[in-house]
Amino acid sequence: KQYFPNLIDGMWTLWICVTTAIYPDVMMPAYNQNRMSTFYFIFFMVVTYFFLMNVVLATVVNAYDNELDKRKTNLEEQSAANLKKAFKFMDVNREGAIDRETVMALFLILNEDFPEFRTIPGDEAALLFAVLDSDGSSFIEMDEFLEFGKVMLLEFERKAPHVTVIEKYLPWLYFTPCFQFFRKAIQSKGFEILVDVIVVFYAGMVAYSSYPYLLGKTDIVLNPRAFNGHIDTSWEKVDIGLITFYIWELVFKMIFRGWKQFSKSRRNMFDLTITTLAALSAFYVYTPTEYSNSLLIRYLVMARVLRIIRWWPVFQTIAGVATDVLARSVNLLLLLFCIAYFFADLGVQVFGGMITRDPNNPRAQILANSLFGQSHYWANNFNDMFGAMNVLFNLLVVNNWTECYAGFEAVVGDRWPRLYFLAFYIVGVVLANNLVIAFVINAFITEWRLRKEELSGDDINTQDAVIHGHVAELEASQVTGTQTNLSGRYTARLTHRGFREETDKLVLHNLLTQSYRASSGRKTQSVRDSPRRTSDTEASRRQSFMT
């Protein structure tokens, strides 16, 4: 009768069971008296929690996927329609093709009047036109122009001989045998292995010496000199020595490789971040302040051991995929935040000021005798937006949310606060939170598959470009059969384009492969051989387009 005194409370109890907040607490009174009663709860949980709730989740995810596909289709149709309108507008002579001059003018307009677009330099504009002109005819047909959106995702970078600051301004030093020997030694694989050995050995020693302390053994006596703000213990000297070694290591790497090449490596940036934090913590600990615990430095220096993750490529892939998926789930997380903010504001308006410890307020005594007060949940209230958002985050986690609602039910003296918590659970947990989980799982699996496909297999040679992974290398003089009047080698890669459905390698292959359509020859012949009208009408139309 504690959990099932009447029909309404019994239904509420079973709903709490579905959320798994206090299961099997609600079962134990009946189970202690009759063990056969467990079959009632097991049957209910199997039907509702293991089946119905998963059906709800699948329904929500399926509806989300269908809506996503519908929106994608609509966007593609709208994009194609807009590109067709733009093509007809630029095709002033109604020849079914637009020339190089018109497309380059379009790039100029994008640079000058549309700040939301990235700036397109002259050489990159020539390369973009060459990619767009997939049949090498120097004219753009309608079907080629429909690829304008994908082509604009390409970013090109000229491959030039890398020259460091030392090589540029101090060549007499750079080409000395001693400098070259030192440069090769620092950049060698053996040096990286040496750093890894030092990092792992230091982390092992710290873990071994700190193990009893981390287990919470109170009989461990720590050296009091480690907390006096002076470098006078062996561990502190080792810490400072390692920080100094790491700083010089990174300085030499930046000198020998240059900042541009150095910053391209995630490992280098991780080492730089950890070393910077360790150096700043040492400065903070050993300057006259109230905080002088050198253990902070030790644990920060030890954190550099995470660099050995590169030994296992699968972990690198997982970290890269997780980073990309997190960036792409921002919109759904913002949706979840907006839902929580709305309910938090509603909670402040409805329940604000009800939770109090004022001894002169009779509500304080009511709360003290409730499950809410006995669980010391006083700070979980709707007295302000910060507290309200914290309460709703606790509800998203689900566990022990019953203690929270019990306090508001006690001070109100009625059951209607349950409606608020029930509504947020359905909207915030069943719908929004499950959408976030489903999106992350789906995006992670898809991105994992695409990355495996990109890294596996041989390089693709399209005659004009060699594609490896998500980067293409090409000779700029001719791209997809189009002469660019450029020279040198360039690399091409796709910028961030949201949730991917095909590999960058495949997209680059499609964009950088010359097409030989049956219509291209006719188009080239008809456009090139037809007299180019230079009437005032054409000139005025072109001037209108430029304007």
Image: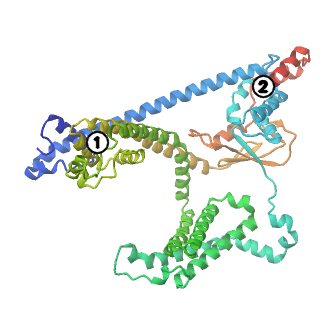
**Residue sitting farthest toward the left:** 33
Q: Which picture quadrant has residue 539?
A: top right
Asked if residue 265 lies left or right of residue 364, the reply is right
Label number found at residue 50: 1
Identify the secondary structure beneath mark 1: helix
Asked if residue 430 lies left or right of residue 277, the reply is left
> What percent of the width, then of the height, locates residue 110?
75, 33
Q: Which picture quadrant has residue 533?
A: top right
At 63% from the left and 72% from the top, the residue drawn is 246
Asked if residue 261 lies left or right of residue 354, the reply is right
> What percent of the width, then of the height, locates residue 199?
56, 73
The nearer-to-camera label among 1 and 2 is 1
On screen, residue 293 above or below 513? below
Q: How is the image coloured?
A: rainbow
Q: Amino acid at mark 1?
A: Phe
Give the camera-side residue of 99 and 205: 205
